[in-house]
Image: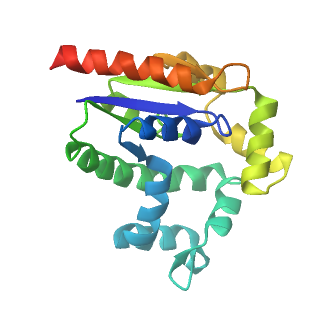
């Protein structure tokens, strides 16, 4: 079974592309969503996050995402500390999930695919590309944040051009090309590769 990574800069539309693959019957592992769930449910992670960020990290047992985000997006050391404990837990969870799948290929959608090192466990990587202005507008609308908030997050991520240069395939998601035909083309390609490998 092929393991395909799906990544891109914040606001590039990774999740939209992932949902198209899902409609084609391909299982998708949403690493960022799983990370949030593990930060809530994994008691070892909860303890370590509380030790790093203090009791304000959780409100009545619920992860205080705004509190943590405000800290990590202004403190590089805290961000690295958080990633150092969350990434390994997510990688372990992803490996278990992938081993349970039976489709010709799977998609692992993650913003920090290269940063976390999980790209090394994948056969191919798809990068989703969108221009910066459009990406910023998408995040503002989605997360109800300011442009400055989005720019701050972007600065904490790998440069979009550098990220895309590491990808095997690129999907353009800037409203100049239709998404579905691009996804279908890759879908057929991956099915062909998976069949040949089998």
Q: Is residue 62 left or right of residue 108?
A: right
Residue 57 figure quarter: bottom right
Question: Residue 157, image x and y in percent?
Answer: 63, 37
Q: Is residue 38 left or right of residue 13?
A: left
Q: Name the quarter where the C terminus is drawn.
A: top left
Residue that protrudes farthest toward the bottom in the picture: 60
Task: Describe the colour scheme in one phrase.
Answer: rainbow
Residue at 75% x, 26% y: name it: 131
92, 126: nearer the viewer? 126
Q: Name the quarter where the N terminus is drawn.
A: top left
Question: Residue 33, image x and y in percent?
Answer: 49, 55
Residue at 45% x, 63% y: name it: 37
The answer to whether 113 is drawn above or below residue 146 in the figure is above
Residue at 25% x, 36% y: name it: 103
Question: Residue 162, image x and y in percent?
Answer: 60, 21
The answer to whether 163 is drawn above or below residue 7 in the figure is above
- Label tally: 0
Question: Residue 26, image x and y in percent?
Answer: 36, 37
25, 106: nearer the viewer? 25
Residue that protrudes farthest toward the left in the picture: 198
Q: Is residue 136 left or right of residue 81?
A: right
């Amino acid at each position: 079974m092929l393991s395909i990574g799906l990544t891109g800069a914040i606001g590039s539309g990774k999740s939209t592309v992932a949902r198209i693959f899902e409609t084609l019957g391909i299982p998708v592992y949403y690493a960022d969503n799983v990370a949030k769930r593990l930060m809530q449910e994994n008691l070892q992670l909860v303890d370590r996050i509380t030790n790093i960020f203090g009791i304000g990290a959780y409100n009545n047992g619920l992860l205080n995402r705004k509190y943590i985000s405000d800290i990590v997006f202004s403190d590089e050391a805290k961000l690295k500390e958080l990633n150092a404990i969350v990434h390994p837990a997510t990688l372990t969870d992803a490996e278990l999930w992938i081993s349970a799948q039976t489709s010709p290929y799977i998609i692992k959608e993650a913003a920090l695919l290269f940063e976390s090192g999980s790209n090394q466990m994948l056969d191919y990587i798809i990068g989703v590309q969108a221009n910066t202005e459009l990406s910023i507008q998408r995040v503002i609308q989605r997360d109800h944040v300011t442009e400055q908030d989005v720019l701050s997050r972007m600065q904490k991520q790998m440069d979009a051009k550098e990220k895309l240069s590491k990808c095997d395939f690129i999907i353009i998601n800037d409203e100049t090309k239709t998404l579905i035909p691009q996804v279908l083309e890759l879908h057929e390609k991956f099915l062909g590769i998976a069949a040949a490998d089998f």
